[in-house]
Image: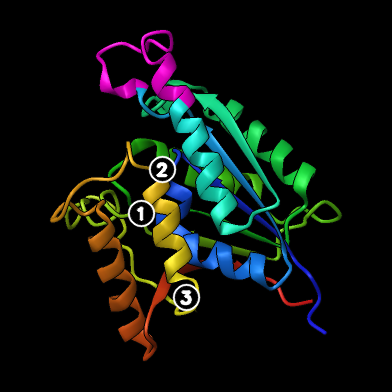
């Protein structure tokens, strides 16, 4: 019998977790793994010139409900929504972000951790990637994460231009043929975040990407990752 694993997904904004690895999350949940989702930033408030949570109070409440619905569809064990400033994580001291993630890693003690790719256009994605790598450094006697994987995020990863950051060149794929439907239904719950085709963050675009990543490895649908570290025990 396959041993259950502890999975932690650290994402920047509500919907990133589904865009990046929703099919993989559902696959872990179906197999009986313990899956925990942490979303660090609030969403929405970057749509105005100054951060104003009160102005977006109703929208933030609806976004939180959408996040819960989406992750219920995926079958996760827990969802934690934090309140880092949306698209302003670079305004925080990097050490404070690292310390927060270290606390999360110590709390959940994951075997596998999924987070953002370093080369994304979105600044929050990049800062979180850097903080996760630092927080997951393999210190003897206090290291839980055996596998560190970085996902692509539609409307951020592919928006980066050549030469400005490391490109997303996947070397790890997960067959999500049987969980793509859950991923798409979870994204439909994020109605305020999704766009219409041909936007990269549309249901159709995400479905096309899943089929393309599947074609990369000869299956119907897949999600692609960059393997950051893998420790075999």
Marks 2 and 3 close (CB-CB < 8 Å): no
Q: Relative to residue 85, is residue 168 depicted above or below? A: below
What residue did someone put label 2 on?
Answer: 125
> Is residue 54 within the magenta segment?
yes
Q: Where is residue 205 in the image (x, y as percent from the top left)?
A: 23, 62
Kind of element beneath mark 3 = loop
Compared across the picture, whether 175 is left or right of 207 comes to right
Q: Mark 1 Cα within 10 Å, few/some/many (few <14, many 20+)?
A: many
Q: In the image shown, does 133 or 100 lie closer to the viewer?
A: 100
The disc label shown at residue 215, or none: none
Kind of element beneath mark 1 = loop
Answer yes or no: is residue 232 visible. yes
Answer yes or no: is residue 117 visible. no
Earlier residue among tags 2 and 3: 2
Q: Position of residue 25 (x, y in %)?
A: 57, 62
Q: Mark 2 Cα within 10 Å, few/some/many (few <14, many 20+)?
A: many
Query: Closer to the observer: label 2 or label 1?
Result: 1
Q: Quadrant of the C terminus?
A: bottom right
Q: What's the image's color scheme?
A: rainbow
> Is residue 202 within the magenta segment?
no
What residue did someone put label 3 on?
Answer: 176
**Magenta residues?**
45-61
Earlier residue among tags 2 and 1: 2
Earlier residue among tags 3 and 1: 1
Query: Closer to the observer: label 2 or label 3?
Result: 3
Q: Position of residue 174 (x, y in %)?
A: 49, 76
Q: At x 49% / y 66%, what residue is drawn?
A: 23
Q: Quadrant of residue 98?
A: top right
Marks 2 and 1 close (CB-CB < 8 Å): yes
What residue did someone put label 1 on?
Answer: 153
């Amino acid at each position: 019998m396959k041993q259950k694993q502890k999975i932690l997904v650290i994402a920047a904004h509500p919907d990133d977790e589904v865009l990046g690895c929703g099919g993989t999350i559902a696959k872990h949940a179906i197999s009986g793994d313990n899956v925990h989702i942490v979303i660090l930033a609030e969403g929405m408030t970057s749509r105005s010139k100054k951060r104003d949570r009160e102005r977006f109070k109703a929208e933030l409440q609806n976004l939180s409900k959408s996040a819960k619905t989406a992750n219920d569809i995926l079958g996760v064990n827990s969802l934690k929504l934090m309140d880092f400033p949306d698209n302003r994580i670079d305004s925080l001291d990097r050490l404070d972000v690292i310390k927060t993630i270290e606390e999360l890693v110590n709390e959940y003690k994951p075997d596998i951790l999924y987070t953002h790719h370093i080369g994304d256009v979105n600044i929050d994605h990049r800062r979180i990637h850097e903080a996760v790598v630092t927080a997951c450094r393999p210190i003897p006697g206090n290291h839980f994460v055996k596998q560190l994987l970085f996902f692509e995020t539609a409307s951020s990863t592919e928006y980066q231009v050549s030469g400005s950051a490391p490109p997303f060149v996947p070397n790890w794929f997960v067959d999500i043929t049987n969980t793509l439907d859950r991923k798409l239904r979870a994204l439909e719950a994020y109605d305020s975040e999704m766009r219409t085709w041909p936007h990269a963050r549309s249901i159709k675009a995400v479905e096309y990407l899943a089929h393309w990543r599947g074609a990369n490895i000869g299956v119907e649908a897949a999600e692609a990752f960059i393997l950051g570290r893998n420790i075999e025990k």
